[in-house]
Image: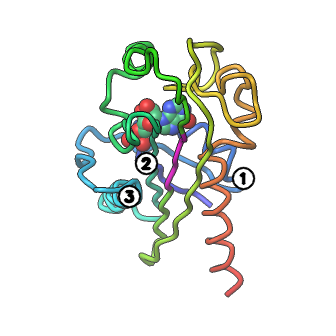
Amino acid sequence: MRAILCSRNAHKARELEVLLPGWTIEPLAADDYPPETGGSYYENASIKAAFGRTRIPGWTIGEDSGLEVAALGGRPGIESARYAPEGAPAIAKLLGELEGVEDRRAQYVSELVAIAPDGEEFRGTGVVTGRIAMEPRGSEGFGYDPIFTPDGEEQTIAQLGDSWKARNSHRARSAQALREAVDRRGSA
Ligand code: IMP
């Protein structure tokens, strides 16, 4: 099955290609993506998938994700991509906000929406809980992965690596839920 991923994030396309076996995921190159004005991950994922349908016929996929930090009242949350420039600046800003803060609990959330050629919508949600490390460690993954230590682990996701992510991440879980939703339709 071929699906268009409505995202500019090449990391996500690569991860989803592994997470959705049997699907060929092609990122949609567009410079006029609509702004992420939804009030939830689901709404933003739907906006992205619906935008794809205006460009290319066939299955389209939208994904929206974020990092929610308990001590920051759930920020940056759906604003994660706009919190600070991706990578070192975003990590430095978050560690700065958490300086001296003992409660390091956080979670990653991923919402996937797939729209079939006939317009039927499928969705999958995934969450992984953990804590924010005191300093960045590791080199795999992207975004906040060098400072996110999943529950039950001592290393950050950037240290645990892509194979850990493919089995356990928020996106692995939302992709699994999406696959199950699409499979239920196939067997209905
Ligand atoms: P989106 O493209 O609007 O969904 O932005 C998601 C943002 O959340 C990214 O830019 C990252 O800052 C953060 N994020 C989501 N998933 C991950 C992940 O797997 N690793 C690291 N950061 C992530």
* Mark 2 and mark 3 residues within 8 Å of each other at the beta carbon: no
**Amino acid bearing label 1:** Pro
Q: Nearer the viewer, mark 2 or mark 1?
A: 2
State the image coordinates of residue 24 (x, y, percent, origin top left): 61, 50
Up-down relation of residue 61 to residue 102 (above or below): below
For the C terminus, give its image quadrant: bottom right
Q: Residue at x 68, y 68 (%)?
A: 180
Q: Which residue is mark 1?
A: 21
**Amino acid bearing label 2:** Asp
Up-down relation of residue 13 to residue 86 (above or below): below
Query: Which range of residues does the magenta coloring cover?
Result: 107-111
Q: Nearer the viewer, mark 3 or mark 1?
A: 1
Up-down relation of residue 79 to residue 39 (above or below): above
Q: Nearer the viewer, mark 2 or mark 3?
A: 2
Label 2 CB sits under 8 Å from any ligand 1 atom: yes
- Residue 64 numbered tag: 2
In magenta stretch: residue 108: yes
In the displayed structure, does residue 65 sit left or right of residue 129? left
**Foreground residue, 135 or 168?**
135
State the image coordinates of residue 74 (x, y, percent, origin top left): 41, 42
Q: Residue at x 43, y 21 (%)?
A: 98
